[in-house]
Image (cartoon, helix red, strand yellow):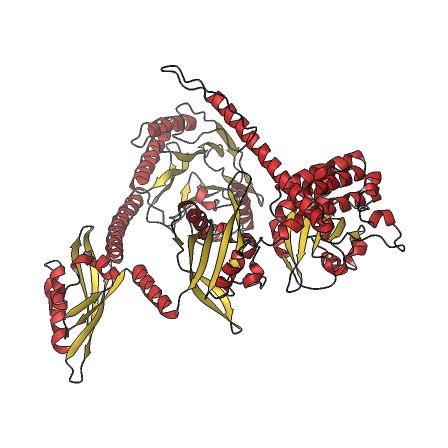
């Protein structure tokens, strides 16, 4: 019966009204808090009863006298009753070591006195309160890991602790990290098992039973292998034994990042905390109590005779009833953990200690499910490496868990080689989507694997078909070929490998049948072995590949035809002169190079014509896109620009009209760049305007430069563009290069780099070389050309005296 549990009546909700969920929530919260309080009270009572039992065992007094003795000791030492209970349980181990007369700092290394008076004289009220809180917290501790967390929480403020490690001596030698807090899991895994080697501070403490205070990290590194990466993470450390001398089985480490000595008060505080923890550790390490009838020993005796690995697991529950772990109450001799403990040595350990990875394995959920429902659990087969006769081998196991009263019986079943071979054969059939079949021609018996029924989409309840009836499963079109192959095998023993199709509930499937005969001494077939394989996915992929190749070939043909037509159209609309052209006294070389990649023809173009009155018109343009549309737009712009300028239109006016023309073309998103230049021969004056086009290069007196571009927006980008003109007076010997962007642009490179490369190439040419564009293109175009290139190389003759 739970005394003190209260409840409040809940009025039924009015008709049609929703219940007051907030009020119900408050009631549930109060009841949960009351249950937690009662649980703490029950746990505290258990600690008190165990301490009374210890006093009764040591003194032979009655329970009432034991209780009075505990009260007297607590009052005399200035401690709480709970602290005194923990200290009493801790004294089941011999007292902690006392300082020797030779120690230079007796107060700093002494253990607390038996009655606690010396401790209370040194420790202040704050430390005493902290110890009282630690004593209360220890009531809820269920494992060394919980103890490390609680200890760090209570030592962080007064001592400055930032890490706690608890090591326990292993029966086979060395030590094991059984609890930690404040350190990461990687470091904990590295120090989980420590061999029996000198030079590791906690191991030396276990051997000598004396505390080690590491307050100078540089000096400590000369004597010990320090924990931490880097070791300077914790600049001061204290390792304290729980129990003296060779009886010490547990050592507690306190780690701090600051380089500071452990003063007398801090050392006394640590000794007092260790004294409280000793009692709790003693109770945690205590083996499960045997029943009065000796049933525990009887169960273990049964497990001693069991073959294979088997454990009897009892659930360990939290204060709220959830399963936190399982305690090993019996173990077979073949059950071995990573530390080498086996059989009876495992009794009392937790399942997480026996198999640390178990919370992440299906076995954990399987145990919880069996505990809740009672339905046995059997895992999927899994591989595990083990050592047999000094050799490592990979064995296959299955874990089975059944309920055994309030506990669980867990067994690891090893599969023998024949089981593993059968499992591998099943895996091969499943992964290869094939099934085997055997036909006995003497007894007329047939045997199919499970996968064979699945491949042929046949109900296993109907059984297999005889070999002569196998062609009847195929579609009518494939039946004759399969029937002929089966007939030849039965008459002549000739093996076959025949593709065929069957109609199933999933549609038509593409299968393959392979078979061979076993003959008697006279050569007569008496048995047939074979398999059927589902090749539907492979056949579908082959058909899809053929269809894709056909589509690609068709598309390639169309693109090639388009390219051929566009190239012929471009050649007809944009004929290239075979030699330099003399216009208005200027020598002009023309070069056009199509792109070297892709199937499309670009829209780069030029125009160099003589105008009425002796002037000359030079135009270079680039239409966005490729193919027939780009060539058509190029032709429209070329002839329109030449016609407008020839009839007296200004350069900017021509660009404005061309912009409107492009905006109202059949491609509303089409754009183009252009540069128009009109040369007045009588004045040697060049007027030019541009629409988003790269600037011309002027070579004068051996130095090349880019002309400053007047304002001009790309054609087709806006219905209200602004264009301006610029002028240039040419001098004898001047050279002017007009070009499209394919001459200077390269992928992943700034356009300024291309301009600088162009200027160097123009300056690097011999001025006496005829005005051919071949050397210029050779110097600028390297590797695969990704865009069309159009160049007008214009030269003013040098005047001779």
x then y, percent, for residue 486: 13, 70
x then y, percent, for residue 533: 24, 62
x then y, percent, for residue 529: 22, 71
x then y, percent, for residue 743: 46, 45
Judging depth in this view, the residue of 231 and 378 nearest the camera is 378
Res 258 → quadrant: top right
At a point 34% along the width and 36% down the height, the residue shown is 638
The reply, left or right, for residue 645 in relation to residue 341 is left
Judging depth in this view, the residue of 689 and 625 nearest the camera is 625
Q: Is residue 186 visible?
A: yes
Judging depth in this view, the residue of 71 and 33 nearest the camera is 71
The reply, left or right, for residue 46 in relation to residue 637 is right
Judging depth in this view, the residue of 748 and 307 nearest the camera is 307
Q: Residue furthest bottom?
A: 521
At a point 33% along the width and 46% down the height, the residue shown is 600
Total labels: the figure holds: 0
The reply, left or right, for residue 714 in relation to residue 441 is right
The quadrant in which the C terminus is found is: top right
Q: Is residue 295 above or below residue 116?
A: below
Q: Is residue 256 visible?
A: no
């Amino acid at each position: 019966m739970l005394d003190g549990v209260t409840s409040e009546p809940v009025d039924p909700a009015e008709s049609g009204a929703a219940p007051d969920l907030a009020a119900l929530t408050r009631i549930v919260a109060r009841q949960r808090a009351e249950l937690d309080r009662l649980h703490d009270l029950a746990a505290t009572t258990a600690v008190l009863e165990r301490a009374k039992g210890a006093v009764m065992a040591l003194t032979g007094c009655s329970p009432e006298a034991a209780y009075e003795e505990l009260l007297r000791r607590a009052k005399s030492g200035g401690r709480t009753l709970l602290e005194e209970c923990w200290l009493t349980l801790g004294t089941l181990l011999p007292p902690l070591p006392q300082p020797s007369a030779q120690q230079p700092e007796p107060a700093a290394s002494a253990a607390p006195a038996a009655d606690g008076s010396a401790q209370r004289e040194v420790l202040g009220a704050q430390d005493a309160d902290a110890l009282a809180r630690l004593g209360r917290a220890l009531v809820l501790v269920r494992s060394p890991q919980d103890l490390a967390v609680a200890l760090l929480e209570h030592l962080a403020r007064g001592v400055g602790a930032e890490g706690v490690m608890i090591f326990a001596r292993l029966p086979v030698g060395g030590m094991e990290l059984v609890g930690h807090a404040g350190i990461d899991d990687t470091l904990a895994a590295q120090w989980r098992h420590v061999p029996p080697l000198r030079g590791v501070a906690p191991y030396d403490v276990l051997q000598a039973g004396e505390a080690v205070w590491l307050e100078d990290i540089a000096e400590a590194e000369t004597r010990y292998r320090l924990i931490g990466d880097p070791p300077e993470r914790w600049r001061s450390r204290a390792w304290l034994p729980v129990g003296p001398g060779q009886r010490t089985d547990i050592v507690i480490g306190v780690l701090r990042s600051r380089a500071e000595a452990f003063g007398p008060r801090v050392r006394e505080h640590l000794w007092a905390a260790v004294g409280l923890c000793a009692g709790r550790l003693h109770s945690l390490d205590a083996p499960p109590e045997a029943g009065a009838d000796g049933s525990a020993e009887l169960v273990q005796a049964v497990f001693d005779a069991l073959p294979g690995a088997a454990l009897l697991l009892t659930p360990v529950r939290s204060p709220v009833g959830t399963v936190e772990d399982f305690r090993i109450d019996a173990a077979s001799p073949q059950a071995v953990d990573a530390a080498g403990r086996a059989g009876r040595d495992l009794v009392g350990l937790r399942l997480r200690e026996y198999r640390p990875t178990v919370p992440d394995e299906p076995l954990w959920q399987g145990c919880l499910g069996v505990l809740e429902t009672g339905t046995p659990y059997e895992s999927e087969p899994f591989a595990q490496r083990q050592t047999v006769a000094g050799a490592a081998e990979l064995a296959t196991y299955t874990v089975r868990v059944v309920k055994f009263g309030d506990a669980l019986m867990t067994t690891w079943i090893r599969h023998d080689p024949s089981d593993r071979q059968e499992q591998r054969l099943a895996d091969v059939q499943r992964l290869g989507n094939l099934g085997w079949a055997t036909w006995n021609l003497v007894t007329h018996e047939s045997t199919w694997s499970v996968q064979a029924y699945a491949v042929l989409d046949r109900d296993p309840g109907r059984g297999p078909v005889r070999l002569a009836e196998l062609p009847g499963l195929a579609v009518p079109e494939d039946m004759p070929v399969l029937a002929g192959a089966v007939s030849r095998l039965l008459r002549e023993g000739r093996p076959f490998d025949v593709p065929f199709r069957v109609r199933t509930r999933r549609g038509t499937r593409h299968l393959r049948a392979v078979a061979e005969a076993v003959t008697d001494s006279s050569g007569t077939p008496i048995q047939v072995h074979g398999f059927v394989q589902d090749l539907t996915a492979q056949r579908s992929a082959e058909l899809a590949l053929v269809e894709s190749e056909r589509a690609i070939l068709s598309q390639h043909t169309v693109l090639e035809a388009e390219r051929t037509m566009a190239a012929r159209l471009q050649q007809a609309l944009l004929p290239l002169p075979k030699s330099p052209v003399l216009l208005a006294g200027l020598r002009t070389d023309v070069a056009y190079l199509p792109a070297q990649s892709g199937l499309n023809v670009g829209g780069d173009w030029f125009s160099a014509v003589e105008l009425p009155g002796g002037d000359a018109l030079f135009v270079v343009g680039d239409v966005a896109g490729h193919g027939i549309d780009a060539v058509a737009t190029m032709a429209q712009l070329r002839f329109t620009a030449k016609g407008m300028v020839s009839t007296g239109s200004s350069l900017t006016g021509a660009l404005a009209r061309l912009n409107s023309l492009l905006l109202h073309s059949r491609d509303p998103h089409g754009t183009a760049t252009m540069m128009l230049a009109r040369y007045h021969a009588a004045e040697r004056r060049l007027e030019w305007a541009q629409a988003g086009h790269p600037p011309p290069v002027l070579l004068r007196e051996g130095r090349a430069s880019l002309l400053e571009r007047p304002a001009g927006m790309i054609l087709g980008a806006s219905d209200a563009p602004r264009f301006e003109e610029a002028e240039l007076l040419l001098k004898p010997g001047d050279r002017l290069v007009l070009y499209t962007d394919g001459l200077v642009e390269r992928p992943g490179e700034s356009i300024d780099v291309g301009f600088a490369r162009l200027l160097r190439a123009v300056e690097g040419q011999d001025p006496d070389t005829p005005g051919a564009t071949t050397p210029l293109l050779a110097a600028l175009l390297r590797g695969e050309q990704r865009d069309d290139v159009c160049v007008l190389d214009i030269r003013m003759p040098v005047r001779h005296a």
